[in-house]
Amino acid sequence: MAGRITTHVLDTGRGKPAAGMKIELYRITGDSTWELVAESLTNENGRTTAPLLESSGVVPGVYELRFGAGAYLKQVYNSGLSEQPLWDIIPIRFHIADAEQHYHIPLLIAPGGYSTYRGS
């Protein structure tokens, strides 16, 4: 089985998938800089239409998902937020040891908090 990196975003404040959120995937390079390897917008199901990275593109190393939460929250809750959203970019840094595995890293978000876990 070839490895892949996927995600989805659920808006727990609304009880719905978070559609239209920008997601960027970075990988740290040998010279300790971050390289953008994929970017996408979530669809109506809060998912990307394809894996962010798969097959030979997945190699062991350190990765970071960056979720554009601020822009999403401002757009969706614009009339319900009395101030600028607390969250802007939510980074989730993780390690890939086995490039043959599926790494599913979801984000659960609301105006007052967020969480993540290793999904399946």
Image (cartoon, rainbow, N blue to C red):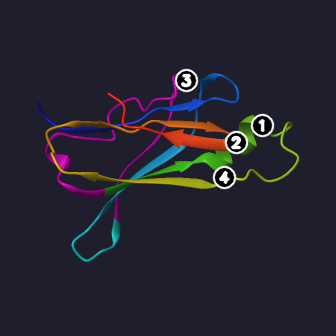
From the image, state whether disc 4 or disc 2 is nearer to you.
4
Q: Position of residue 102 (x, y in %)?
A: 24, 35
Q: Is residue 14 above or below residue 71?
A: above
- Residue that badge 4 annotates: 87
Q: Residue at x 61, y 38 (%)?
A: 109
Q: Find out whether the residues at labels 4 and 2 contact each other: C-beta distance under 8 Å.
A: yes
Residue that label 3 marks: 44
Amino acid type, label 4: Trp
CA–CA distance in space, label 4 to label 3: 21 Å
Dot 2 crowding, Cα within 10 Å, few <14, some 14–19, many 20+: many
Which disc, if any, is residue 73?
Answer: 2
Q: Disc 3 to disc 2, how far (Cα)? A: 15 Å
Mark 4 or mark 2, which has the lower sequence index? 2
Q: Which residue is mark 1?
A: 77
Q: Amino acid at mark 1?
A: Tyr
What secondary structure is found at the residue carrying circle 3? loop
Disc 4 residue crowd, few under 14, some 14–19, many 20+, Cα 10 Å = many
